[in-house]
Amino acid sequence: MDKQKIIDSSRNFVKQYLNNQEAGHDWSHIQRVYMLTKTIAKEEHCDLFVAELGALFHDIADTKFNKNSDADAAIITSRFLESQGTPNAVIEQVCYIINHISFRKNITNQSKLTPELAVVMDADRLDAMGAIGIARAFSFGGHRNRPFYNPDIPPRTKLTRASYEQRNGSTINHFYEKLLHLTEKMNTSTGRQLAAGRHQFMQEYLEHFFNEWNGRS
Ligand code: ADP
Ligand code: NI
């Protein structure tokens, strides 16, 4: 098996597949998650090949943005990987990552964490934090036509799957409902270290935001 060849053909396949996605879930997100996965995996005990493929395919069918379900995602992924001669044991582990990575599903359903899922999940969460995370949040809010802030709508304190997908709310609330909780959810110590700087940057951003909102500085 030529691992590099499978990685390269997977990159091309996913890039083509995600060509028309909106800005938060596009190929550049996959590339960043892929790079972060490699950075974290180097420091942790896991199968790098499985983690890299998991990163590349993890958003192949995000149900918020297209009609494919998670089941379709596993089918699309395994068909492609089979066509490239990837061993079944690898395909199964990659599909496990795809089926269990979602933040929404993990609110109610604690998945069994494999080392590779732990790494890709951390990489995906890191890309929702820091400067890129801020850009993605406002891009998502704009896509949904949401106000970026409305002081009359307080952040929801208890997140259920239904309330997470509820349509009203503001992008600033999303920081308090999700983004500022990601650091404590990191699975790996490398992920936690990388999250610390991004977390602090988001806190500083919010401090500036509210100062400016209130006409100060
Ligand atoms: P995950 O990949 O963990 O399931 P999502 O698909 O829910 O994450 O989110 C993708 C991106 O959109 C992330 O950067 C996330 O912060 C952002 N996002 C999701 N929901 C909202 C929201 N209600 N307001 C602003 N940004 C959001
Ligand atoms: Ni993602």
Image: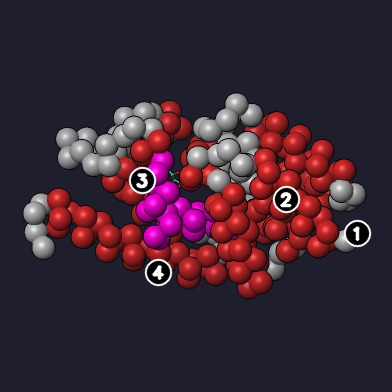
Number of marks in the image?
A: 4
State whether residue 109 appears in this view. no
Along the polypeptide, which appears first: circle 4 or circle 2?
A: 2
Disc 1 vs disc 4: which is toward the camera? Answer: 1
Indicate left or right for 113 with 49 as reference: left
Q: Quadrant of the C terminus?
A: bottom left
Whichever of labels 3 and 4 marks the residue nearer the N terminus, that label is 3
Nearer-N-terminus badge (2/1): 1
Which color mode does the image show? Answer: secondary structure
**Is disc 3 in contact with disc 2, using a CB cutoff of under 8 Å?**
no
Q: From what the image shows, is residue 26 above or below residue 180? A: above
**Predominant secondary structure, magenta span:** helix
Mark 1 / mark 3, whichever is N-terminal = 1
Residue under label 3: 138
**Amino acid type for the residue under numbered disc 3:** Phe
Q: Answer with mark 3 or mark 2, whichever residue precedes in sequence.
A: 2
Which residue is disc 2 drawn over?
12
Q: Amino acid at mark 4?
A: Gly
Q: Position of residue 4 (x, y in %)?
A: 81, 62
Circles 3 and 4, Cβ within 8 Å, touching? The answer is no
Q: Residue at x 67, y 51 (%)?
A: 56
The picture places residue 36, in percent across and down from the top left corner, at 58, 63
Question: In the image, which is nearer the foreground, mark 2 or mark 1?
Answer: 2
